[in-house]
Amino acid sequence: MKRTGNTRMAQLAPSEIRAMTQACAKAKGLNMAQGVCDTPVPVPVREGAKQAMDHGFNTYTRFDGLAELRQAVARKLARYNGIQADPETDITVSAGATGSFHCASAALLNPGDEVILFEPYYQYHATALKSVDAVPVAVRMQPPDWTFSLDEVERAVTDRTRAIVINSPGNPSGKVFSRVELEGIAELATRHDLFVFTDEIYEYFLYDGRQHISIATLPGMAERTITIGGYSKTFSITGWRIGYSVAAKRWADLIGAMNDLLYVCASAPLQMGVAAGINELPDSFYQTMAREFQQKRDRFCAALSRAGLTPSIPQGAYYVLADASRLPGSTGKDRAMALLDKVGVAAVPGEAFFSGPGGSRFLRFSYAKTDADLDEACRRLDTLS
């Protein structure tokens, strides 16, 4: 019998984010492609993990995470998001927000189920859906503010539609969904009896006075919403892989069983470090972080504009999509490689976030960099102008 790989893998393209990171390393360039978050880890988070190791938190945890972290997340959800969650039944700690999304998809979706994504979308959301044989269906948002038509969302719903995915603040667009937009989606989801998977990992990265709204807090939405979050970005611990999902108990039971199957549990001492950060860091930490990242956004977007790479100014998160039509090439990959070759700055081709050719004119940059690296990136971009 001829051995072959799983046929599902044929439709799972390698991550362009990883590919450009590798190309950047080879070229010894400045990596603005991957959102690794180069800013320092808060002291309580580091010390909490170290103390946990010293105190013996080095073995398996319960499949849904340590009680200390589930309780800390529950308090934070009530205080910041307005979500009431029972830490014993409703919260599942997983291997990052991506792991949480994968577990929810595998637990709640059937092969052939259609899932609506807002385009541009996070590439891993689309590939996670494909990995469980669900079918992503894109609804296009329009730059520069990434607006969308609720009528188009309605037209995308079929008898096979099972869920809608929201990412707010969004990667790669930086879009923050407004209350009016969320209310429209909530009404549609309720009328068609759909799940809403909402990835809110960038919930603290908000600019220009915006506020974060969790769709699970809208009337009737708690029972059908899977709220996904994590601290990889907020605490600059992208390599720790600590995320969580929040759902009604009957859905959390299924997600938890899948999490046990795929990951067993998240890292015990690192869970304790995250719990320490949630418990000990004051509100001023998050407010200061948002101000600092807004300043990074403004500096970097100004450099993109000077370079003729017109940015769609992000409302949140720490990514920006820029129009790279002026760069040579017919594809986003051509343009990304041209930029890397010319000035040594790596970005992600826009096609990674679009289902059709519309992404070819965009490049995505991450400005979650140290001030020194951000200044250097701006200096290099200035040589294009």
Image (spheres, helix red, strand yellow):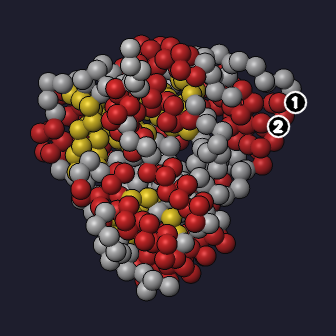
| Distance from the alpha carbon under mark 2 to that under mark 1 | 6 Å
Q: Nearer the viewer, residue 192 or 187?
A: 192
Is residue 102 placed above or below 38 in the rendered structure?
Answer: above
Residue 11, located in which quarter of the rendered image?
top left
Location of mark 1 (residue): 54
Q: In this view, does 196 lie above or below 314?
A: above
- The answer to whether any part of residue 298 appears in the image is no
Q: Which residue is drawn at 45% across and 72% down?
A: 339
Q: Is residue 286 left or right of residue 180?
A: right
Classify the position of the C terminus by image quarter.
bottom left
Q: Which quarter of the image is occupied by the N terminus?
A: top left
Q: Name the amino acid, label 2.
A: Lys
349 w.r.t. 41: above or below: below
Location of residue 277 by image quarter: top right
Q: Where is residue 325 in the image (x, y as percent from the top left)?
A: 30, 72
Front-most of residues 332 and 41: 332
Q: Alpha-carbon neighbours of circle 1 within 10 Å: few (<14), some, or many (≥20)? A: few
